[in-house]
Image (cartoon, grey):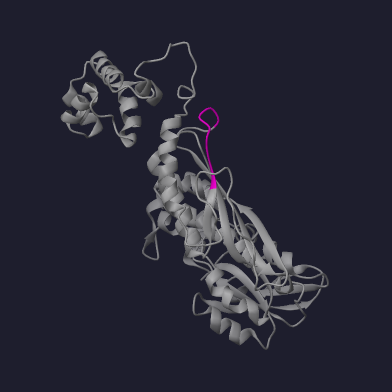
Amino acid sequence: MLNGIKVGNFIMEKRKSLCMTQRQLADKLNVSFQAISKWENGTVYPSIEILRDLAIVLEVSVDDILAGSEREVDSLSYSKAGIDITYTDVIKKEMAKHLNTKDSRVLNGLGPFASLYDIKFPNMENPILVLKSEEPGSKQKLAMEYGYTESICHDMINHLVNDIVVMGAKPLAVLDTIVCGKAEKDTIKTLVKGISDACRDNECSLVGGETSIQPLVVEAGVYVLTSSIVGIVEKSEVIDGSAIEEGDAVLAIASNGLHTNGYSLVRLLMDKTPQIKLDKIDKLTFIEQIMKPHTPYYKSMKGLFHKNVIHGMAHITGGGIEGNLCRVIPDGLKAKIDLSKLKILNIFKYIRNNGNISDEEMLRTFNCGVGFNVVVSQKDKDAVMKHINQFYDCYEIGIIEAGECKVKFDKRINWL
């Protein structure tokens, strides 16, 4: 149990040992000197939000303040190892605000050891769970460096959802993991808010997760994100490419930029020519262009799932069109892609020209303006394109033919 007088005396002794007046300590913490006086008199405790900053200024741990004494120098503690339990509890309270959901299937919130989710689907005869894990790759390093902390969460969740959309699945629930070297409340709060908002935008719920503080493994200021999703689809409506036939049309849905792939090459380009960071492409700086959040495709596709018109879908990520579309093309067929029809975004032209990158490398590394492929019959393609064009630019780029190579490129990209 806390002892107000003991806590107050400890704060006063540590302040004086550092040769600070009450006013000087108040200025460092951005509080009134009257607050300092009340703490030291033992009439009021420092708020939970200010404790960590107070501990840093007094060069002690939060646990030391709450105990009213500094532990032996040679004794070990979790706080001295870099993890302050009291402070992490504050962070958890902040997280709880963003885990509130109107989804009645979520049966508990933050606190229990695991999340409970009701999987009764009375309208489905044979529901199938669709599972996937994802992380935003090296783009997250740039995000932390240039202030796109919340935006990178949308990258991660949008990418994650897109990967189950290709199966015709509805996203249900997400679990996230945040690994860091030092728990910074404002940063973690922003990350959890970003993940929660991105889930809400994709009509699913953030139901829980893990924040792992590893000061001896990860450097302070470094955050590593990952997340997992569960979706649902009726077994008879799973879209896996098996319905693709010779003569089907291959459609492209536009990306808004790099999405979450190719950033190792981009960072190499930035290291080689750092002046490009502020170059303008379509009225945005290079950094603003490459940090656009990954396009989410669920809302543009869900209205087509029950109409039996989609034969196959591919999310175009690392490996480009060839490396992803091939995953849904049945044996004995190939997608013949007319490269001259691709609507190349200016950011890709800029990267190609400044990096002196070959067409083959561009197609293998980037989406080059195509974020999603949809394969449909010739009779349905116009209706499908009309529907998708309400959300994103959608156009025809190829046809399914007999063959063994899965994906074949025809003609050349028009870079002009």
Give whichever of 348, 404 is nearer the camera: 404
Q: Quadrant of residue 411?
A: bottom right
Span of residues in magenta: 209-217
In the displayed structure image, the side of residue 371 where residue 154 appears, left or right: left
Identify the image quadrant of the N terminus: top left
Percent from the top left, x then y, of residue 102? 47, 62
Q: Residue furthest bottom?
A: 379
* x 18%, y 20%: residue: 21
Q: Is residue 104 visible?
A: yes
Residue 216 on the magenta span:
yes
* x 50%, y 17%: residue: 76
How many numbered circles does the render carry?
0
Q: Is residue 145 visible?
A: no
* x 70%, y 74%: residue: 237
Say above or below: 377 vs 157: below
Percent from the top left, x then y, of residue 353? 51, 59
Give whichever of 344, 197 is nearer the camera: 197
Say above or below: 56 vs 274: above
Percent from the top left, x then y, of residue 366? 58, 60
Residue 185 on the magenta span:
no
Give whichever of 139, 210 is nearer the camera: 210
Percent from the top left, x then y, of residue 131? 66, 57
